[in-house]
Image (tube, rainbow, N blue to C red):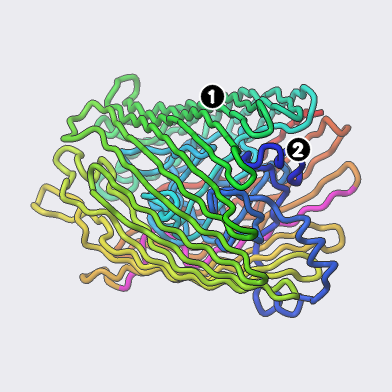
Amino acid sequence: MTHATDDSARWPLLPRVPILLRALPWTLPWALPWAAPLQAQVEAIARLDPIVVTATRTAQTADETLAAVTVIDRAEIERRQSKTMTDILRGLPGVAFSSNGGLGAATSLFLRGTESDHTLVLIDGIQVGSATTGTAPWENIPVERIERVEVVRGPRSSLYGSEAIGGVIQILTRRERLAPLTPRLSLGAGSNNTVRTSGGLSAGSERGWFDASLGFEQTAGFDACRGEPFVGGCFVDEPDDDGYTNKNASVSGGWAVTDWFGVEASLVRSEGENEYDGSEFAGNRNQTALQTAQLRVELQPLAAWSSRLAIGRSWDDSKIYFEETFRDRFATQRDLLSWQNDLEIARGHQLTLGVDYQRDRISTERFYADDARDNRGYFAQYLGHLGALDAQLNLRQDDGSQFGNHATGNAALGYTFETGLRLTASYGTAFKAPSFNELYYPDFGNPALDPEQARSAELGVSGPHRWGRWAANLYQTDVDDLIATVQVTPNRFRPENIDRGRLRGLELWTTAELGGWIMDANLSLLDPRNESKGPDQDNLLARRPEQTFRLDADRQFGRIGLGGTLFVSGRRFDDAANRIRLDGFRLVDLRADYAFSDALRVQARIENLLDERYETAAYYEQPARTLMLTLRYQP
């Protein structure tokens, strides 16, 4: 974990590596008495405030931004021994998952109760995911490549365009600053014949840095689906273990040519093969590939003007097999070009102007009426700091070849008292363009669909207490023109803009250091209602739990580290009619590590200690009790 240094001043637009944001909740009634008016305490906590770049597309501390943000950095990932994106994100404020099994299984994320395709996912600023399904491949993102994850909750279409209804999750890959050539190696083995290996080299100087890495993961898995023909789940009875294999690699580097000119480039690729219970029609094996590539140039022609030009491409490829027979392929290629300018128009006042261009192309064995689309987005942002008052205004105009013009905006205010207590209020709009499947899938798509539209209001309060920080966020999001599948003939279904959803929620989080223990906790309460007229009106939206709670506790005893995680999820329903109930569950994870030296340590983690049997999607089993041992070397 590092703070921003003089290196970032020489190259001001480089994302600065933040230290750990220990941001998970307690309860507001307990937190308020702790907001002690000690200026020294406030300043000490401010020094621990991480830098985020996703909430405003500019570098701010987590306290400066008016958005609800959680940051998970490399140190926290390693301390908690997180192995998947689900490990990292599950139980964070506003985050819920559903999964069709274990490692490599199809996974959906619901941010603040919005749909699984309502969260924009970026890797180093490049959007990833399938343009046919509209979702991101969470199961194929390699965790060993990650430097930090930034989760921004709330609408961000006024900065990023389509999909950012629930928020934005950005994954920033590893980079080294001011360090000699340093190798790293990780070897792991565990339950279900799981093996993991990862290695890399990195170096950094005052002018440049580079990082390169390779990784491999394989597991025999378990029988994930207990489906029944014509009933549910995978609709087949195929009692065999569903294995998964992943190979990944990345390389990145940057060079500050002068004090005002720098360049960065990166390439990330992850290839997976997942077995699942399926049929000759749907397949039972999936080969996937996720890849991003980008080149970015940073300029600072004047002290008050910095400019960034970025060009990138992402690939998402899925090949479906039944046994060894090829059945289908769905591939997405997404090209992106972005030019952003940040202007300090006066002390404490910043104006950002930019333009984004994006072109999506798909390739498949099936015939789609259209296989490409492009979009131009023009955005402006004002950030103001007037004493204790902070303000943010955003406007964006998107011009898409499929859905025409669409305008979005956001306004936020924050006021900070001398005690460090901060009040925030915001209102924003967002939209989501239909996916290619919803528009053009043969005998299903509807090319007359309109974008889904959302508006959201939020109130927040945060501050320090004597042991750490706390925050509470109350929000409501209304989504109109939700796309739902309707039956148009006895044998045909198609998507229509008929649904309306209302999402109300409360997020509480806190961190504390007590007796040497680092403790993080959060509680998310959600009321995700279907407000569409019809038999499902006022029902809960499918697969969203109404309550989630997570508590992490870690402590170092000399060379020995101990820790644990408690995660509790409330009930959810698997269908819009709320007839298929999935019970709530609790998960207990324990972890320990021993440092032989500063460079070499061994780690052990037990997941689901109580061997809880649970489902987040009907008929799909989740992992039972597992053990993972890891040997990690990094000088």
x 59%, y 52%: residue: 344
x 57%, y 71%: residue: 424
Crowd around label 2: few <14 · some 14–19 · many ≥20 (10 Å): many
Residue 116 visible (yes or no)? no
State the image coordinates of residue 563 (x, y, percent, origin top left): 76, 51
Residue 378 visible (yes or no)? yes
Check if residue 555 falls in the magenta segment: yes
Q: Which mark is residue 247?
A: 1
Camera-side residue: 346 or 306?
346
- Quadrant of the drawing holding the C terminus: top right
- Quadrant of the drawing holding the N terminus: top right
Above/below status of 570 relative to 225: below
* Separation (CA) of disc 2 from disc 1: 22 Å
Check if residue 438 falls in the magenta segment: no
Above/below status of 251 relative to 529: above
Classify residue 520 as left or right of residue 611: right
State the image coordinates of residue 23 (x, y, percent, origin top left): 67, 59
x 80%, y 76%: residue: 37
Residue at the right extreme, as displayed:
558
Camera-side residue: 536 or 271?
271
Q: Which mark is residue 480?
A: none
Span shown in magenta: 538-557
Above/below status of 327 relative to 41: above
